[in-house]
Image (tube, rainbow, N blue to C red):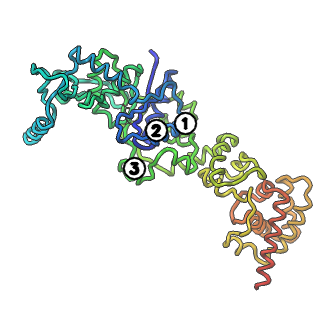
Amino acid sequence: MKIKTRFAPSPTGYLHVGGARTALYSWLFTRHAGGEFVLRIEDTDLERSTQDAIDAIMDGMNWLNLDWDEGPYFQTKRFDRYNAVIDEMLEQGTAYKCYCSKERLEALRETQMENGEKPRYDGHCRDSQCSHAADEPHVVRFRNPQEGSVIFDDKIRGPIEFSNQELDDLIIRRTDGAPTYNFCVVVDDWDMEITHVIRGEDHINNTPRQINILKALGAPVPEYAHVSMILGDDGKKLSKRHGAVGVMQYRDDGYLPQALLNYLVRLGWSHGDQEIFSIDEMKALFTLEAINKSASAFNTEKLQWLNHHYINHMPAEEVAVYLAWHIEQQGIETRNGPELKDIVKLLGERCKTLKEMAESCHYFYQDFSEFDADAAKKHLRPVARQPLEAVRAKLAAITDWTPGNVHDAIQGTADELGVGMGKVGMPLRVAVTGVGQSPGMDVTVQAIGQARSLKRIDQALAYIAEREAQA
Ligand code: GLU
């Protein structure tokens, strides 16, 4: 049997981390088995579905590189098919028309509530012999079995049983002729030959209803796996308050998709105590059985730790592709400076996110006319003039501009002046970067370039002269 899974988001908001994790689990499961992955947009709720949300879902899936083999299907484009199935069910008697008025249903509900019963349809029209005019308003209901129970073996939670007495006759077509959500899901899973439905635990109550309809249609019943919720680090359901936002926000904040995927796979799934998984490892090792039954708590620090790991362990050329987007956001022109892969190597250790990296690499590309006030106050003092002049002379004399030769120039200056390296390095750092923190001076100065470094040292010397004059 060919494994086939689907991710079926409702486009009523962003693709959030919970949805992305469900998508990842479905995708991994099917990739592990060499099966197929379907993307289906469940846009039957016309009022709440938006094109922006559809775009955000596609952007998120693309950014995470969760590719699909079929789709995207849109439920709103399949209404004819759903209605054809409903018409067949009416003919076969597995569904029936219900003419109960709103008033009758409301009164029924009230009485049931008063008697402490769960509100449910009483089956009034189920076996009614009353004749009705063809154009009389009605809904169509599924004729749910009244005896026995529905049992399914949830791949994560084990056997789950619902008594059919708990399930009333679900409306599958509204008065306006629109098929309802649970019904569309059933027809889709059937038509798309889905073998495994992996979705959020908030759908558990839909599963027995869907199974009953599938059985009535003579359709195969897929396996089900309901994934637990994600909680915030305070134990409450993850929400915007916890910074849980659309997946693309994580891109904007400087996370690598590889890091987010690694984070999400571990959020509720484990393989021993391994923390780092390449995509290929995830595909090779993923099983539904190893998904955790209990809810998982989101932990931003761990995500940052993973991101730092990926920034420093993925090939710098690959990280550079993602960094380029952030550099563009910063409006930095990189043509006359180091290659981005070199920036990744230079700044990777110091940065948890690519946003941070893009924000702290300006000096490799852009000249500046002002120094960071604190750094300048501390390091561009009159005593720094001599070491700066001396190191400038040595740097100017270098014919082969390598980090080693830059290092020798700094070391040589310190030795000649009989001072520690810091007395030369720190003024030089502030002079060439404008700030008090940077990677090692040899690699930094080398990457900034010879002419540019000399020009910036001159600018720092002018600053010191001005300071001297004011003293
Ligand atoms: N459209 C549903 C949701 O976004 C998913 C339904 C399903 O996977 O069956 O929650």
- Quadrant for the C terminus in the image: bottom right
Q: Whole-percent x and y of residue 149?
A: 21, 23
369 or 285: nearer the viewer = 369
Gap in Å between the C-alphas at discs 2 and 3?
20 Å
On screen, residue 100 above or below 213: below
Q: Whole-percent x and y of residue 135?
A: 19, 25
According to the image, label 2 marks what residue? 54
Labels 2 and 3 touching (C-beta < 8 A): no
Q: Amino acid at mark 3?
A: Ser
| Left or right of residue 252: residue 165 | left
| Left or right of residue 450: residue 286 | left
Q: Secondary structure at mark 2?
A: helix
On screen, residue 97 above or below 403: above
Labels 3 and 1 touching (C-beta < 8 A): no
Name the residue rendered at 41%, 32% in the picture: 8
Q: Residues within 10 Å of mark 3 (few under 14, many from 20)?
A: some
Q: Residues within 10 Å of mark 1 (few under 14, many from 20)?
A: few
Q: Amino acid at mark 2?
A: Ile
Name the residue rendered at 85%, 52% in the picture: 402
> Along the polypeptide, which appears first: circle 2 or circle 3?
2
Q: Secondary structure at mark 1?
A: helix
On screen, residue 29 above or below 394: above
The part of the image, by quadrant, that contains residue 459 is bottom right
Q: Is residue 212 visible?
A: yes
Q: Which mark is residue 239?
A: 3
Q: Whole-percent x and y of residue 30?
A: 48, 25
141 or 276: nearer the viewer = 141
Q: Which mark is residue 62?
A: 1
> Along the polypeptide, which appears first: circle 3 or circle 1?
1
Gap in Å between the C-alphas at discs 3 and 1?
23 Å
Is label 1 within 8 A of ligand 1 (CB to nearest ligand atom)? no
